[in-house]
């Protein structure tokens, strides 16, 4: 997939304020400062689309971006930011709960963890929550430019153990040098491509090709 266009849509304090126009959504979650907003900028090749900061807790609202005029990328506020008070934590929890339980358009979640650190209790909780809700996700290990290529595989082991995934399912990513960008784009493409039989829409071709009901499988299907 190529990102031809990326636009900021809206910042929301609560998800239910978003009118939603039925477009599929991909959400980005992870600890504060892990690189969520930077990933969005790297993927869209727009360095200032999502606001980033070296100070954790930059993104406090739900920020929604429209990509290729066809799907929404949702930048969620980070968790585990030590400096926020109890009230702010409760507000965050409610915001996330609202989002995950209300969004009908959510198709997939990118779960970001820093490749240099073991996942935290918050990361594990988020992972369990997504599994319970049956929400498909991909783990992305960020800031991989900070360690050598050789050390990366070793760093993935504790992440795999904590989040119950296999090393090959994790995308090693860097928004500094764009490592893993292609894989993120491939993942976007695959999760946004709804198999034709699931759409419930009969195209002219399938209607007219009664003798070949299985003839619509695309050549690049895996
Ligand atoms: N070296 C390196 N630094 C990164 C990378 N991704 C993000 N950073 C830096 O990490 C800091 C935090 O990045 P953000 O993208 O703002 O993090 P965030 O997850 O959106 O943070 P919150 O909005 O606070 O939840 C910034 O200083 C970024 O420049 C990366 O892949 N490599
Ligand atoms: Mg952010």
Image: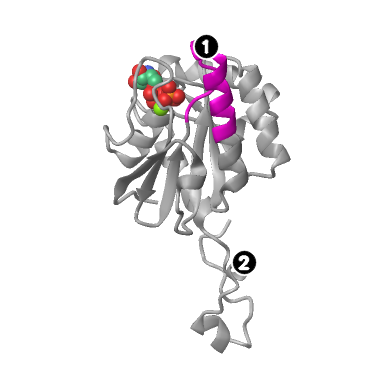
Rounded to the nearest whole Å, what is the CA distance between mark 2 and mark 1? 43 Å
Vertical order, 221 against 75 (above or below): below
Report whether the residue tagged 1 is closer than 8 Å to ligand 1: no
Estimate how packed mark 1 is, as few (under 14), some (14 to 19) or many (20 or more) residues with alpha carbons within 10 Å: few
x and y percent of residue 206 in the render?
A: 56, 81
Q: Is residue 118 shown left or right of residue 184? A: right
Instruction: Tell me, yes or no, whether the highlighted magenta stretch contains residue 87.
Output: yes
Q: Is residue 44 shown left or right of residue 81? A: left
Q: Secondary structure at mark 1?
A: loop
x and y percent of residue 72 in the render?
A: 43, 49
Residue at x 47%, y 52% (from the top left corner)? 189
Query: Where is mark 1, residue-wise?
Result: 82
Vertical order, 186 against 60 (above or below): below
Query: Where is mark 2, residue-wise?
Result: 198
Residue at x 69%, y 44% (from the top left corner)? 134
Q: Is residue 165 visible?
A: no
Furthest residue in direction top, as rendered: 83
Q: Quadrant of residue 217?
A: bottom right
Q: Secondary structure at mark 2?
A: helix
- Ligand 2's image quarter is top left
Which contiguous range is marked in magenta? 77-95
Furthest residue in direction front, as rendered: 87
Residue at x 49%, y 25% (from the top left corner)? 78
Instruction: Tell me, yes or no, whether the highlighted magenta stretch contains residue 24.
Output: no
x and y percent of residue 159 in the render?
A: 62, 22
Vertical order, 78 against 100 (above or below): above
Q: Is residue 131 visible?
A: yes
- Mark 2 and mark 1 lie on one chain; the one further toward the N terminus is 1
x and y percent of residue 51 in the render?
A: 32, 29
Query: In which quadrant of the rendered image does the C terminus lie?
Result: bottom right
Q: Which mark is residue 13?
A: none
């Amino acid at each position: 997939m190529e990102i031809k266009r990326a636009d900021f849509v809206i910042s929301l304090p609560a998800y239910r304020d978003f009118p939603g126009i039925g477009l599929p959504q991909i959400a980005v979650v992870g600890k504060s400062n892990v690189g969520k907003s930077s990933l969005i900028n790297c993927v869209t090749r727009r360095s200032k689309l999502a606001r980033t900061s070296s100070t954790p807790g930059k993104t406090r609202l739900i920020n929604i971006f429209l990509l290729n005029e066809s799907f929404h990328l949702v930048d969620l506020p980070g968790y585990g930011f030590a400096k926020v008070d109890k009230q702010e934590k409760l507000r965050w929890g409610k915001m996330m709960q609202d989002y995950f339980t209300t969004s009908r358009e959510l198709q997939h979640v990118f779960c970001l963890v820093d490749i240099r650190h073991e996942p935290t209790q918050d990361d594990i909780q988020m992972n369990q929550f997504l599994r319970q809700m049956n929400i498909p996700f991909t783990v992305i290990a960020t800031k991989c430019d900070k360690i050598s290529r050789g050390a990366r595989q070793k760093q993935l082991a504790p992440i795999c153990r904590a989040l119950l995934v296999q090393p090959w399912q994790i995308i090693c990513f860097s928004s500094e040098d764009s490592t893993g960008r292609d894989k993120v784009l491939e993942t976007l493409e695959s999760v946004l491509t709804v198999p034709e039989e699931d759409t419930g829409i009969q195209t002219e071709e399938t209607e007219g090709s009664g003798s070949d009901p299985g003839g619509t499988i695309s050549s690049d299907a895996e």
